[in-house]
């Protein structure tokens, strides 16, 4: 059930360089069931900017009717959002899309959660829900550099956590796939830049349970405008397609062309 | 008295508010959000003979008070629309206006002939103005004689009234309108998007994979108002107006310009509940302005 609600800001703070954690209060929290779903955010009323911004849900607290968005201040829209203060409201449409299938990992099995940069946030709620059902979780989180790292301790509270940075200024120097090769697991859940998702998909092509969450420019976010379509892997040049906003953003690896 | 009831060729509408083609898919997504029976009509996504995937992504780019799109007429083709989409829409008591597109006259004729026979299709909207496909589309919408000839051929095969969707990307919009009226059009829908481009600051290249796209949203409303104002005084067929509408006030402005009904496009992407909101707001606005019926507003800017 998709709802449009003006949610009040509980708190907003910068948790890493240009990375903001925004906690909102709203009744639509009760509809947020799948980790990996997103909300479509109107950062300002009027026409500047006109369209909504899709942001993934990082954490859900149903008891307090609060949910957390973590985003990077990267353009005009997110700059406006980052300037909002406690007690102001934000126009939210959601929850949208299909999230990560937690049912694919049984209690006692091990899941590795692989995130890159601003793809890390939805993995936090996913990890929480997996741990709750008795799954062992491991996290491999990649960032550009030390200044961009966030939520490392929070992830550590759920399971072993490996951080990589491109420049080696924190954790292991290199990419997430370098660390993954050292680990054993039953399921891969992944969210991050397309290059990272491609590397994960290629590195684990024969692995049965690999899930990737995609990012794409969106218009409506509800499946009507056909802005965020991608080809399906079994028909890469044909007419069959998936919409990232409603069929995804999470797909099984090999389902769509990255 | 239903103050919003609107009669147009082939269309007996509860109200004159409908989602514009390409901004509402085939209704399924919005059907999960509100009762589609509330709408005056639905203009479904453009249908071509064969299925089309459309253009590569990125397909949308935001602009000041608007957006560019270059979807490229993605649709399941006439078979898919006839077998899956239109039957699904039959559960609603809403007239469907089928948007017909193609690359050749034969394409348009084939789609028009078949889709006009569907039980719930009560009018066609001839898409001679899509700026995002390599062949056809806009070519038919910029040369008066070509547009007239196409209108005539489609009129010969369609069993429902034919509205022609005009492109604003022309020097003389009145000339285009008169040409399709001569060709036998039962009505006009206007305007389609304005051709535009945006460049990326870092790469210096166009943001859209298609390079150019159609500009829509509040930014184009004054262009639409001007064109409807000019055309409505020169033709004897009704106009369904569109271009940046997002409120009941906008609707009345389009009626003043000369429209007899309106369509809402880009605003559906910003607020998916916008159409029922506008329909709900209209009676109170008519009260404020002192009108009994919305049809009294049509053409007041020049009449």
Image (spheres, rainbow, N blue to C red):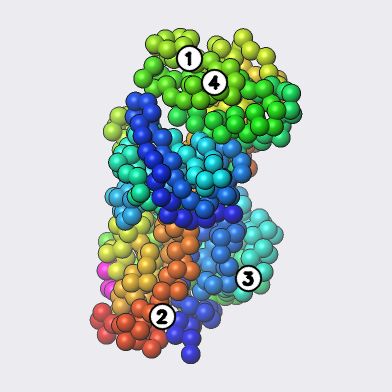
In three-dimensional space, the C-alpha distance between marks 4 and 3, rounded to whole angstroms, equals 52 Å
Write the residue at 58% across / 72% down: B37
Classify 10 Å Cα crowding around label 4: few (below 14), some (14-19), many (20 and above): some
Q: Which residue is mark 4?
A: A156
> Disc 2 or disc 4, which is closer to the eye?
4
User: Range of the magenta residues?
Assistant: B226-230
In three-dimensional space, the C-alpha distance between marks 2 and 3, rounded to whole angstroms, equals 23 Å
Cβ atoms at labels 1 and 2 below 8 Å apart: no
User: Chain ID for label 3?
Assistant: B
Residue A230: image tag? none
Q: Secondary structure at mark 3?
A: loop
Classify 10 Å Cα crowding around label 2: few (below 14), some (14-19), many (20 and above): some
N-terminal-most mark, 1 or 4: 4
Q: Which residue is mark 1?
A: A164
Q: Which residue is mark 3?
A: B92
> Disc 4 or disc 3, which is closer to the eye?
4
Q: Please tell me which residue lies in front, B158 or B284.
A: B284
> Disc 2 or disc 3, which is closer to the eye?
2
Q: Secondary structure at mark 1?
A: strand
In three-dimensional space, the C-alpha distance between marks 1 and 2, rounded to whole angstroms, equals 60 Å
- Residues tagged by mark 1 and mark 2 found on one chain of the structure: no
Quarter that holds the N terminus of chain A: bottom right
Q: Please tell me which residue lies in front, A21 or A1.
A: A21
N-terminal-most mark, 2 or 3: 3
Q: Which residue is mark 2?
A: B283
Q: Is residue B231 left or right of residue A103?
A: left
Q: Is residue B179 left or right of residue A220?
A: left
> Disc 1 or disc 3, which is closer to the eye?
1
Q: Splitting the image into 4 quarters, where does residue A12 fall?
A: top left
- Residues tagged by mark 1 and mark 4 found on one chain of the structure: yes
Q: Secondary structure at mark 4?
A: helix
Q: Residue furthest left?
A: B302
């Amino acid at each position: 059930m998709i709802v449009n609600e003006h949610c009040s800001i509980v708190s907003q703070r910068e948790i890493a360089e240009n990375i903001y954690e925004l906690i909102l209060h709203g009744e639509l929290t009760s509809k947020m069931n799948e980790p990996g779903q997103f909300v479509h955010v109107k950062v300002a009323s009027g026409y500047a900017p006109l369209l909504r911004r899709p942001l993934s849900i990082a954490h859900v607290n149903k008891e307090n009717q609060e949910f957390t968005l973590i985003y990077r201040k990267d353009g005009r829209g997110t700059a406006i959002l980052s300037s909002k203060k406690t007690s102001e409201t934000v126009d939210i449409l959601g929850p949208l899309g299909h999230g990560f299938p937690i049912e694919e990992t049984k209690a006692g099995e091990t899941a590795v959660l692989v995130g890159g940069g601003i793809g890390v946030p939805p993995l936090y709620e996913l990890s929480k829900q997996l741990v709750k059902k008795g799954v062992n979780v491991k996290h491999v989180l990649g960032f550009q550099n030390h200044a961009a790292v966030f939520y490392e301790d929070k992830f550590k509270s759920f399971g072993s956590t490996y951080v990589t940075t491109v420049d080696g200024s924190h954790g292991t120097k290199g990419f997430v796939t370098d660390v993954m090769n050292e680990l054993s697991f039953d399921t891969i859940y992944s969210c991050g830049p397309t290059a990272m998702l491609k590397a994960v998909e290629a590195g684990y092509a024969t692995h049965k349970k690999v899930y990737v969450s995609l990012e794409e420019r969106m218009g409506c976010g509800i499946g009507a405008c056909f802005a965020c379509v991608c080809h399906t892997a079994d028909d890469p040049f044909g007419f069959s397609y998936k919409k990232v906003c409603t069929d995804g953003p999470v797909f099984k690896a090999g389902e769509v062309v990255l | 008295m239903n103050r919003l009831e609107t009669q147009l060729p082939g269309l007996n509408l509860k109200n004159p508010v409908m989602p514009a083609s390409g901004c509402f898919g085939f209704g399924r997504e919005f059907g999960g959000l509100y009762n589609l029976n509330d709408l005056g009509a639905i203009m479904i996504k453009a249908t071509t003979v064969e299925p089309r995937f459309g253009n590569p992504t990125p397909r949308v780019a935001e602009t000041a008070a608007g957006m560019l799109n270059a979807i490229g007429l993605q649709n399941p083709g006439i078979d898919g629309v006839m077998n899956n989409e239109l039957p699904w829409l039959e559960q609603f008591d809403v007239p469907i206006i089928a948007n017909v597109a193609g690359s050749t006259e034969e394409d348009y004729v084939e789609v028009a002939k078949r889709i006009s026979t569907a039980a719930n299709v009560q009018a066609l909207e001839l898409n001679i103005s899509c700026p995002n496909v390599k062949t056809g589309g806009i070519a038919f919408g910029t040369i008066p004689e070509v547009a007239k000839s196409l209108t005539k051929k489609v009129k010969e095969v369609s069993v429902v009234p034919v509205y022609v969707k005009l492109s604003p990307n022309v020097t003389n919009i009145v000339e285009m309108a008169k040409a399709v009226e001569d060709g036998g059009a039962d009505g006009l829908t206007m305007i389609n998007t304005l051709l535009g481009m945006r460049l990326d600051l870092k790469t210096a290249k166009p943001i859209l994979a298609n390079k150019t796209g159609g500009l829509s949203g509040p930014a184009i409303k004054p262009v639409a108002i001007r064109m409807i104002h000019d055309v409505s005084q020169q033709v004897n067929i009704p106009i369904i107006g569109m271009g940046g509408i997002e409120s009941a006030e906008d609707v009345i402005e389009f009626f003043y310009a000369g429209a007899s009904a309106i369509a809402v496009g880009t605003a559906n992407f910003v607020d998916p509940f916008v159409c029922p909101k506008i329909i709900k707001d209209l009676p109170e606005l008519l009260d404020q302005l002192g009108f009994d019926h919305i049809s009294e507003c049509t053409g007041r800017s020049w009449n």
